[in-house]
Amino acid sequence: MRRLSFLATILATIVTLAALVVAGPRMAAAQDSQTLVQRFATENFNDIAGAVAALAGSGSPQAASVIEALRDGRLVYRPADRSVFIRQPDGSFTAAATGNAEPAPAAARPVRLNNNVRRAIEAAMGALSLMHPDPARRMAAAEAVFKSRDAAALTALSQALPAERDARVRKLMEEARAAILVADNTARDADRIEAIGVIQRRGDQDALAMLGSLPADTAPLVRQAADGAITAVRRSLAIWEAGQNVWYGLSLGSVLLLAAIGLAITFGVMGIINMAHGEMVMIGAYTTFVVQQAIRTSAPALFDVSLFIALPLAFLVAGAVGVLIERLIIRHLYGRPLETLLATWGVSLILQQAVRSWFGPTNREVGTPSWMSGSFEIGNLAITTNRLAIIIFAGLVFTTLLLVLKRTPFGLQTRAVTQNRRMAGAMGIRTNWVDAFTFGLGSGIAGLAGVALSQIDNVSPNLGQGYIIDSFMVVVFGGVGNLWGTLVGALTLGIANKFLEPYAGAVLGKILLLVFIILFIQKRPRGLFALKGRAVE
């Protein structure tokens, strides 16, 4: 019996020791967590910021919830024993160190915030999210660490980098790590120079600002490497800026192409200077507005396809107005260009006033479908989705019009009238109807331009006036009646305008372009691509 009692005592001792071995680390961790959390029980902002950084780097499972509660103003402490609590959204309380439910603390005070503490919270949350399952959260966390350059996140980055499988997130983490090393004067020069190379490869304005903000006592070798990297980044940014200007120029050129292409075929076939062409653009934009208003009222689910509904309607409405103008007014004025110019100018004023009376003089809201919203980046090149859609649309309109003029009977008759009206009439072509349908086609295309412009410009009665002069410039520069000339002219003037704007300003840039075109037509009166036919008879 004594032996059994002795063995039982030994067994109980072994079990107790094992329990202590297992529970010991947990107790120590809980004690460490309690010590870290108690550092928030103060009115000193610097101590609170230090507590945030220490808790974030401790690996405590409560770190994220405590720092989030501090950020949201839900972290409180009891001055009597420096206990810290989290007030949950439902009003209950939990212990900050353990997460266990607690009764509402008496005489609790909120842990206060200032800008220094908020910056510490942002950096800490970034470090804590580096291991989050969501790649977007990890990417945002790495970007936050890159901007804060918080040395406390270096350990978390070192742990997260080997486990990261997403190439984009890994690249951002490497840049965040490099940003911390570049700013750390205690790091080895070789490590800082290598980090400068990583920042240089990032090559954006944030990288340039970071390389230019090294401490004054930076080692000469590191300073030299940073200066070389700054030069390389500036050179790279200059190239990207030129590419951005080309993109903006293509975007503007596509808008000019849409506005001018209808005018080009009208002017080429009929020789009519149509000052009401801008109002056809305006009619297309207001047709889009009416379609969207009807959809908002009757079928909101169809809003994302509203532009596809508006396109054919805008073409038909603007085209019908164009045919009506040609049949009632312009056909009586052939051969009298000055009278035609004055008459169409009067028509433009009538149409503007009609729209003011019907829709009012203020701007009208035309919404952007979800698939045209947002933007994306290629390197340092920012691409907006709506501008990209307009460029593609302009290309489709140009290609379709080219096929119509080259591959259809109507196109054949139009080209015949353009080249020799009298001979075309002698061959049985009804030139007066070709004129009417060509004017309607040009007006319809202007209506399509109005649909596109409604996504990037104010829809108002004056919408067309902003593009009529530019449209004439494109037509004259490219060559009257020549579609390829209109394309080249629109893109050339669009890109040239965007390259001139940063140096001369928007107004002076347009004046310089106008002077250039005046000088150009002195040498080539028929434009870049001269059209043979009635225009030169």
Image (cartoon, rainbow, N blue to C red):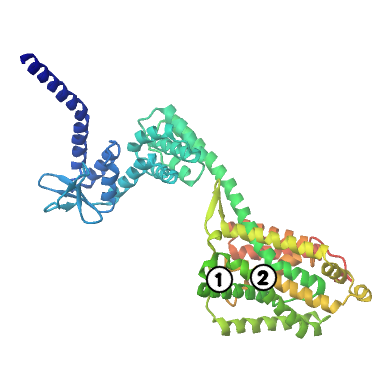
Number of numbered tags placed on the structure image? 2
Q: What is the C-alpha distance between the residues marked 1 and 2?
A: 21 Å
Q: Residues within 10 Å of mark 2 (few under 14, many from 20)?
A: some
Instruction: Identify the mark at residue 312; answer none if there is no mark.
Output: 2
Q: At which x and y percent is residue 157?
A: 39, 35
- Element carrying mark 1: loop
Residue at 39% across, 27% down = 188
Amino acid at circle 2: Pro
Residue highlighted by disc 1? 458
Q: Nearer the viewer, residue 302 or 250?
A: 302
Residue 183 falls in which quadrant of the image? top left
- Element carrying mark 2: helix
Relative to residue 166, is residue 128 drawn left or right?
left
Residue at 75% across, 72% down = 441
Single out the residue that lies furthest toward the left: 2
On screen, 7 above or below 216? above
The answer to whether residue 342 is visible is no
Q: At which x and y percent is residue 139?
A: 44, 44
Instruction: Identify the mark at residue 480; answer none if there is no mark.
Output: none
On screen, 183 above or below 3? below
Which is more foreground, mark 1 or mark 2? Answer: 2
Residue 507 falls in which quadrant of the image? bottom right
Q: Nearer the viewer, residue 467 or 265?
A: 265
Give the position of the N terminus as an image quadrant.
top left
Q: Nearer the viewer, residue 407 or 459?
A: 407
Q: Decide which of tag 1 and tag 2 comes sooner along the chain.
A: 2
Q: At which x and y percent is residue 218?
A: 39, 33
